[in-house]
Image (cartoon, rainbow, N blue to C red):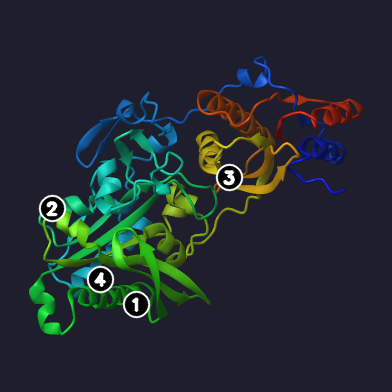
Amino acid sequence: MAISLAQSTLFSKTSLFLRSSCNGLNRLTFCVPFSSGSSLSTKKKWKPPVASVLELGGVKIAKDDVVRDDPTNNVPDTIFAKLGMQLHRRKQHPIGILKNAIYEYFDANYPNKFDTFDDLCPIVSVKQNFDDVLVPADHVSRSLNDTYYIDSQTVLRCHTSAHQAELLRGGHTHFLVTGDVYRRDSIDSTHYPVFHQMEGVRVFSPEDWEASGVDGTDYAAQDLKKCLEGLARHLFGAVEMRWIDTYFPFTNPSYELEIYFQDQWLEVLGCGVTEQEILKRSGKLDNVAWAFGLGLERLSMVLFDIPDIRLFWSTDERFTSQFSQGQLGVKFKPFSKYPPCYKDMSFWISDSFTENNLCEVVRGVAGDLVEEVSLIDNFTNKKGMTSQCYRIAYRSMERSLTDEEINDLQWQVSGCAIDSIQDRKPYVRKLELSYLNDTAEAASRVHEALSRDFLGLRL
């Protein structure tokens, strides 16, 4: 009978050991019940260098104000280090180049109408981030699994929409907001916990639509589509487009714009007519408005042929020197040919386990050396316990990684996973890592361990 990877992690280690021995590798990792004397506790954990004070939106923010000892706080040092980087304000960076190209479109088609904001502080209240844009109280995006909380009432913004209500209340009727946004997410080539968005809003008065022969909602929807179709042509040229009806809590009706680009349909942005409740709360009961939001990384990866979202954070001159102010669509020339290194990790999980929590642990140790974390197998035993096997792909965008370096990172990942498990809700019960040089002993221990709970790490 076939045995799954998640079920037989330890068994597969024996096979790996035997194959690897032919190549001069005689290491095997296996698991026995957790003990406080595990060698993992002696490993020195890597911590990224982080400034103690940052200036955000003209306000000085101390690290202790963001990464604090609060039961709700889930902001790691690696995320705090990204605050204040503001890639969207760098004129020779792909994100900044795209932002300015969009500004040019609005300046040309709506002269002196749209106010622009790109330096608003990313630390906002729960009310701004969720309540003001009508995100339901039970919506999954409010969870600790998805959002970075500073405390129970304060978060790192998940979207630039967090500033929409305050700007409307401030009297702004045409505006673009650009900024860095933060979401706990999976690890792969298109997802990163920090990315950049642009929000656009236009408000109409009754006199704008009364002579048109349609109601305010239809008038706003028609104007919105005309505006964004023009923006798509400005960025991508003469492309085929289509509108998809969708749902957002803050707009009704809601749409997604897709373009046919490089032989495939590509989602460009989400948009819609602003919910009247948002306008009512902002003192604009008699008005209608439209709003759109787009991800700058998503579009930049297409326009500049950038294959991995981690590259946007690279300071390597081989990356940064390829882009110039005002040059939209220059094709990125890859400079990294380094192969990935794969490590597998399997463990029994409880109901409190989430993939985002695991990715946060891995990213906190290895940073941008992690290319992808993917679930490759899932097994549930007769007692209803579930084991999952994850594959971690390590690859630097700038240099070759050594076996020793990757093995050390994997040790640190496992050590931080234990600490995270012990500090918060446990989702793995037992752990110990060892090296064996005797295949007979390994086989014996494998069969013994298969009947117990374990966390398996392949080094």
Comparing labels 1 and 3, the label whose residue is closer to the camera: 1
Above or below, comparing residue 457 to residue 306 in the picture = above
Q: CA distance from mark 1 to mark 3?
A: 38 Å
- Disc marking residue 105: 4
Would you name the residue on which mark 3 appears? 399
The crowding category of the residue bearing disc 2, from other C-alpha atoms within 10 Å (few below 14, some 14 to 19, many at least 20), is some
Mark 4 and mark 2: span between their CA atoms? 26 Å
Asked whether residue 24 is in view, the answer is: yes
Q: Is residue 221 above or below residue 444?
A: below
Mark 1 highlights which residue?
A: 233
> What residue appears at the point 70 percent right and 47 percent down from the top-left corner?
377
Evaluate if marks 2 and 3 touch, with contact meaning CB atoms under 8 Å apart.
Answer: no
Real-space Cα separation, disc 2 to disc 1, in angstroms: 32 Å
Residue 169 - label: 2
> In this view of the protein, which residue sits in the foreground, 77 or 35?
35
Helix, strand or loop at mark 1: helix
Please report whichever mark, 2 or 3, sits nearer to the chain's N-terminal start.
2
* Residue 315 percent coordinates (x, y): 43, 46
| Circle 1 residues within 10 Å: few <14, some 14–19, many ≥20 | some
> Distance of mark 4 from mark 1, alpha carbons?
10 Å
What's the amino acid at mark 4? Answer: Tyr
Q: CA distance from mark 2 to mark 3?
A: 50 Å
Which one is closest to the eye, mark 4 or mark 3? Answer: 4
